[in-house]
Image: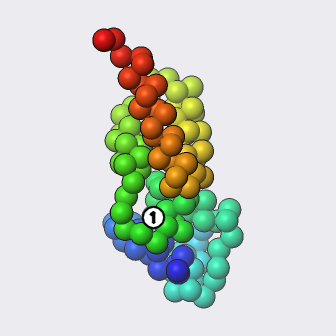
C-alpha cells in the first residue's frame, strides 16, 4: 500500500489542489508532492492533518478496499446535517474520531448497538 498514492487519489477525487491542501493543513505543496510521489513518508500526526483536510476518518488512508461501510455512509449523512449547538458539534466530532479507530468488527457491533438504542428512543 502506498499512502502517497492514496492521498493523491483522495485529493483529486475531492477536486482539491495541493495549494488547497496547504491552506487546510499548513503543509507546503512541495511536501505534499514528495509524499504523493513516495519520496517522503509522513508521520501519523501529518496523516491526521491530511485526513482532516480531506474530511475523512484517518483509517481510510490505510484501508485498501473500495467498499464503504454502512457506518461510513451513515456518518457522512449525519455530518451533512447541522448540529444545533457547539456542544453537540464537539460531541459529534469526538464520536467520529472514536469510531474511526474501530476495526470492521467493532464498527459493526457499534452500529448494531446504536440502532437498537435508536429504536428504544422512538415512540411505538
Q: Nearer the viewer, residue 94 or 67?
A: 67
Give residue 1's position: percent from left, percent from top.
Answer: 52, 80
Which element carries disc 1, helix, strand or loop? helix
- Residue at screen point 59% across, 39% down: 94
> Which quarter shows the C terminus?
top left
Q: Nearer the viewer, residue 81 or 34?
A: 81
Judging by the rendered image, the residue that carries numbered circle 1 is 20
Residue 39 against residue 117 in the figure, above or below? below
Q: Is residue 53 visible?
A: no
Figure disc tally: 1
Give residue 106's position: percent from left, percent from top.
Answer: 55, 48
Residue 31 against residue 10 in the figure, above or below? below
Q: Is residue 81 visible?
A: yes
- Residue at screen point 43% across, 28% down: 116
Give residue 97's position: percent from left, percent from top.
Answer: 58, 46
- Horizontally, residue 122 falls left or right of residue 114, namely left
Residue 69 against residue 9 in the figure, above or below? above
Give residue 84's position: percent from left, percent from top.
Answer: 44, 23
Residue 9 against residue 45 in the figure, above or below? below
Q: Residue furthest top?
A: 123
- Residue at screen point 38% across, 23% down: 119
- Residue at screen point 63% across, 83% down: 40
Amino acid at each position: 500500500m502506498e499512502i502517497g498514492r492514496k492521498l493523491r487519489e483522495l485529493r483529486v477525487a475531492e477536486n482539491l489542489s495541493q495549494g488547497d491542501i496547504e491552506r487546510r493543513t499548513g503543509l507546503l505543496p512541495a511536501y505534499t508532492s514528495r509524499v504523493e510521489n513516495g519520496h517522503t513518508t509522513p508521520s501519523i500526526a501529518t496523516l491526521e492533518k491530511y485526513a482532516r483536510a480531506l474530511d475523512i476518518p484517518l483509517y481510510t488512508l490505510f484501508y485498501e478496499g473500495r467498499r464503504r461501510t454502512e457506518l461510513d455512509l451513515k456518518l457522512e449523512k449525519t455530518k451533512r446535517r447541522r448540529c444545533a449547538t457547539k456542544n453537540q458539534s464537539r460531541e459529534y466530532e469526538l464520536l467520529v474520531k472514536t469510531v474511526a479507530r474501530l476495526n470492521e468488527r467493532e464498527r459493526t457491533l457499534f452500529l448494531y448497538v446504536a440502532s437498537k438504542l435508536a429504536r428504544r428512543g422512538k415512540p411505538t
